[in-house]
Each structure stands twice: as C-alpha cells, then as structure tokens.
Amino acid sequence: MHESIEYKAGDTPLEGYVAMPEKGADKRPGILVFHDWMGLGPNPKKRADELAELGYVALAADLYGKGVRPTDASQASKLATQYKEDRSTLRARARAALDALVAMGNVDPAKVVAIGYCFGGTAALELARSGAPIAAVVSFHGGLSTPHPEDAKNIKGRVLALHGADDPFVKADEVAAFQDEMRKAKVDWQFVAYGGTVHSFTISDAGNDNSKGAAYNENADRRSWSAMRAFFSELWGK
C-alpha cells in the first residue's frame, strides 16, 4: 500500500510518499528515505516500495517543498547547494519527516532509521548529528562533510556509510575527515567502499560511464542493499 502524505516544516508545506506492508497492524520499524538532488522522484519512491515489501513502513521524504521538483541537473545543483549551505533548514526538513513518520501511529519510534542517497545521505547524517532520536543512518554514495563535525557527539544511533571507492565528488580527504569525526565522537560506525565504483552507483538512470564521475553499478547497488539489510538484521534481529 502506498500514498502521498502532506506535512510541514514550520510554514513550509512538504509532500512525501508513504509505502507500507499490506497486512499487519503491529507497530513496525520505520524507514525515512531521503532523495538525491533531483528531489522526490521515482528512485526514492521505488526504494520505499522495496522497504515496504520487507515489512517496514517507509516514508520517502520531501526536502525541497511541495511541488518543488527540479527538471534538470542545473536546477538540482542549485537546490542541493542551497540546503547544503543552510544545514539548519536541512535538519529542520529532515526532522519534520521524522515527526510525520512517527505520527502515523503504526511505527515503533524506537526503531526508526534514516537512509539517504547522494544529497539525501547528507540529510540523513545531518539529522543524526542534530541529536534526533533515530536508531541508525545508512548513507548511499552520500556527501559526508559537515560544517559542524563537533555535532557528531549528538548522534544517538549507529552509522553505515556505503561509498564508491572511485567517487570523484566525495574525495579521500572528505572520507578521512568523516571517519575522524566518527572516531572522535565514539560513534558506532561502519564504512564500506566498493571498488571500481563512482558516485550515484544505485541510481539506475545515471548511465554506465565511470569517467563522468557518476554512474550506475549493478554489483555495488546489489551489495550495498544487502549491506543495509544485514545492518538492519543486526539492529532488530530480522
């Protein structure tokens, strides 16, 4: 079952996409899915549907605002840059999605995870850095940097970062700074790098030319999804 859901961050209307299992009234783990820089399009909705098939309640969140959907890379870059430069608003949008998911009533608030793709990985990590009560974060080829690395001390859950080893947009120094940030804050963190893999490796329409810096990689897509599922099994025993 899936449907659109409207919620707000302050006065800003947002429109997400909820997918949930067909049967069962018990409270279930909830998964926030944060979109890449192209906004709430087919990919995050597809991931929400796949998570519902696994028994989770998934909310593909809206970080840009209702009706704000970039149509090309130029628009997407401007929007993503706007929120990367305004982390307080990015955190507020992510927190509004968390509150909307928990408010649905069939979600166990102690079992909420945020996952994110590219720009959405940044959003998921910022939500954790804000001290939000989430059990874990999974970043798929996400941006790892933050202007406030000291905020990692606020992270309450575990962190799994899934990364393309040849990603030219998230360079080695950014990776090293992220790992140092996690280490200093004593976060329970894992980092997996996939060889021969660049940015956007889970995005099926990203093409297959690694020389462009962003490309789909079937192996890395499959392996990273399996890594996430194993991570969930460790969290909840399922």
Image (cartoon, rainbow, N blue to C red):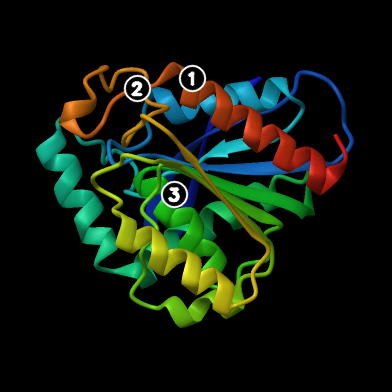
Q: What residue type is labelled 3?
A: Gly
Q: Within 10 Å of the Cα at label 1, are there few (<14), some (14-19), or many (20+) other Cα atoms?
A: few
Tell me the CA gap for discs 2 and 1: 9 Å
Q: Do the residues labelled 2 and 3 touch (CB within 8 Å)?
A: no
Q: Within 10 Å of the Cα at label 2, are there few (<14), some (14-19), or many (20+) other Cα atoms?
A: many
Residue under the image location 38 percent in, 29 percent down: 201
Picture quadrant where residue 43 is located: top left
For mark 2, what is the residue? Answer: 216
x then y, percent, for residue 205: 30, 18
Q: Which of marks 2 and 1 is in front?
A: 1
Q: Which of marks 3 and 1 is in front?
A: 1
Asked if residue 158 lies left or right of residue 144, the reply is: right
x then y, percent, for residue 121: 44, 49
Q: Which of 120 and 16 is in front in this view?
A: 120
For mark 1, what is the residue? Answer: 219
Residue under the image location 59 percent in, 22 percent down: 49
Q: Within 10 Å of the Cα at label 3, are there few (<14), some (14-19), or many (20+) other Cα atoms?
A: many
Q: What residue type is labelled 2?
A: Tyr
Q: Which of 235 and 114 is in front in this view?
A: 235
Q: Do the residues labelled 2 and 1 touch (CB within 8 Å)?
A: no
x then y, percent, for residue 84: 28, 61
For mark 3, what is the residue? Answer: 121
Residue under the image location 64 percent in, 42 percent down: 31
| 221 up-or-down from 229: above or below | above
Secondary structure, mark 2, is loop
Secondary structure, mark 1, is helix
Q: Which amino acid does label 1 sit on?
A: Asn
Name the quadrant of the C terminus: top right
x then y, percent, for residue 132: 61, 67
